[in-house]
Amino acid sequence: MNVLKLTNGREISYLNEVEVQIGIDENDGEEKYGSELKNVEKSDITVHKYEGGFKIWECTIDLCDFIEENPSFFAGKSVLELGCGAALPAVLTAIHGAKEIFVQDFNASVIEFFTLPNFESNEHVAKVEGAAMGWDEVPQKLNGRK
């Protein structure tokens, strides 16, 4: 288990590469998501290909610091994180009392083996839903939600 340490010292747990690989191996991930996972070593932006969802991006710390400094913005609210990957900002909003969270990533393997387990690794009571889809599909999926 890895830990992202924020500026104020709060720690958010997330799976490391070995734990992600164990999840993939134990749940037939290579069989289910072979075409997605063949590009996992690359993070160049290519349409309909893996783009780095198993990585923690630099901006994650900045966004998490903002959330940590403004927890009341998220308490009792619904949260959407697009291109979530690890979803650590959304995880932190859950820790701060968001009531429901929807996370989206293009790759189903990222959602199953990285995103959702990261929510499970941190204490919260939010209702969490994750889906693999393009950004253009999200409005229809969330139709009617506030």
Image (cartoon, rainbow, N blue to C red):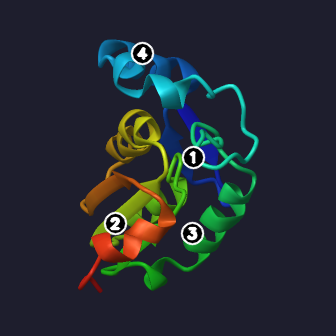
Taking the image as shown, residue 35 lies to the left or right of residue 25, namely: right
Instruction: Tell me, for residue 30, which label it has, or none.
Output: none
Three-letter residue code for mark 3: Glu
Element under disc 2: strand
- Return the disc, 1 or 4, that comes first in the chain's sequence: 4
Whether residue 108 is visible to the viewer of this picture, yes or no, is yes
Three-letter residue code for mark 1: His
Element under disc 1: loop
What residue is shown with label 4?
Answer: 22
What residue is shown with label 1?
Answer: 48
Q: CA distance from mark 4 to mark 2?
A: 26 Å
- Return the disc, 4 or 2, that comes first in the chain's sequence: 4
What residue is shown with label 3?
Answer: 68
Can you tell which quarter of the image residue 80 is in? bottom left
What residue is shown with label 2?
Answer: 101
Element under disc 4: helix
Q: Residue at x 28, y 58 (%)?
A: 128
Three-letter residue code for mark 2: Ile
* Residue 105: % across, % down: 48, 52
Whether residue 124 is visible to the viewer of this picture, yes or no, is no
